[in-house]
Image: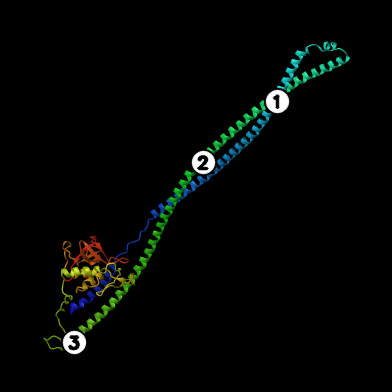
Amino acid sequence: MMERRRGIPLLLATLIGSLTLTILSVPAHADPQNPTDGQIGAAQRSKAQRAKDVGSLKAQIAQAAGQMQRLNDSAELAGERYNKAVADYQTAAHKSAVAQTKVRSAQKQVTAARGAVGKFAHDSYIYGSTMGPSLSLLDASGPTDFIERAGLLQAAGERRTGALSSFQVASVKKANADSAARAAVQAMAKAKSKAAGAQRAAEAKVTAARQQMTVLNARKTTLEGQLVEAQARLSGLVSARAAYLKWKHEQAVLAARRAAKLAQERREAAIRAAKLREQQQELARQQQQQQQQSPPGTDPVGFDPSPPPPSPPPSGGGWSAAKGAAVVQIAEHWLGTPYAWSGGTASGPSYGTSPDEGVFGFDCSGLALYSWAQEGISLPHFSGYQYQLGSHPSMSNLMPGDLLFWSYDGTPSSIHHVAIYIGNNQVIEAPQSGDVVKIVPVWYDGLVGATRPGT
């Protein structure tokens, strides 16, 4: 009787402990990345520096653009001056042509005047015009001849004077025309050369400014690309921080819900234990009454003081290598099935509980119990209990179908995960929420040991 009464608190502790271990056995989610303040600050400084560089370069480009505009204006002015020089050249050329015409006309006049002077000298020599006029008049034969000779002498004198005057005037005009023509040609050539030189200088400056603009624009494009990258990097870090904070809040809410659920389950377990204690007390009271009513030396009806018989072995017999191989094939049939917390029964996958409500699949211990149930060996839906139900082969003597267990501190009391060994240092497992049943290599961090069910 006392042994059974002492079993009541033990049963209550087992119920509460199993609930606690069930909560702790949920595989943890991978924590989102939480960027440090230093990383975010560095990204912000990088973005600000890139923006500053781009702004400075934009100012340089604007300054270079203004300089190039001024050089373009200078080149345009030089071009207009060149056009003026060409126009002046054409005017000078026209004036030169006119001057040349005048030179030719003056040359003709000089030639004609020179001929008149020569003819006068010839006539004077032939006809004796070198004599004085008085002698020519004294030689006249009569009054009429005298008058004619006097007229001829007067005409000859006037002719000589006119011829000499025309010759001198024509010579001066020709000299002036030659001088004007030479001056016009020289001015035209000088203006043309000056304008062309100014245009070349201005065009060289424009070309240099355009090359500078090309370099600045290329650098600006590079910096703008770096600015976009810095902005994207900063945005990614800020988004990661926001996602981490959201995840932390969700985890806090989830932890509160789990704590509330655990507290409720503990209250319900306490109520069940209290009812069980009442039943045990009532049974003990009835047995005591029977003992008091029974004759001495006889056992009361329905009471057996010996301990209860051990539980019968699982149906289907014990372990065999064939069963272990069959368990592997059964588990592999469900590859790709979603992980569902608390999911899986001896009949197959089932709907999970929070946080996997509505997910139809297995958790780690659910996959193990289902697979071995198909070979006639029953296992509880808790990895900590599954570890206890069988012998523990060494890691160098594993067989397909053996169950491998992992714990938080390397002891069986904190087991939180189980997987099915399939050979070649690989296991099949239902890993965690959001994942699926899959095959992975054996990992040794936290590995406690193995159990061979049915042995």
The location of residue 239, given as percent across then percent down, is: 41, 59
Task: Check residue 209 in the rendering and tell me which mark sits there, or answer none.
Answer: 2
The residue identified by callout 3 is 289
The residue identified by callout 1 is 106
Pointer 3 local density, CA inside 10 Å: few below 14, some 14–19, many at least 20: few
Q: Is residue 181 left or right of residue 160?
A: left
Helix, strand or loop at disc 1?
A: helix
Q: Which residue lies at the image location 80% right of the left edge and 19% below the top edge?
A: 158
Q: Quadrant of residue 272?
A: bottom left
Q: Is residue 353 left or right of residue 86?
A: left
Q: Which label sits in the foreground, 3 or 2?
A: 2
Helix, strand or loop at disc 2?
A: helix
Q: Say how the picture is coloured.
A: rainbow
Is residue 205 placed above or below 7 in the rendered structure? above
Pointer 2 local density, CA inside 10 Å: few below 14, some 14–19, many at least 20: many
Judge by depth and name the residue closer to the eye, 105 or 429: 105
Type of residue at label 2? Ala
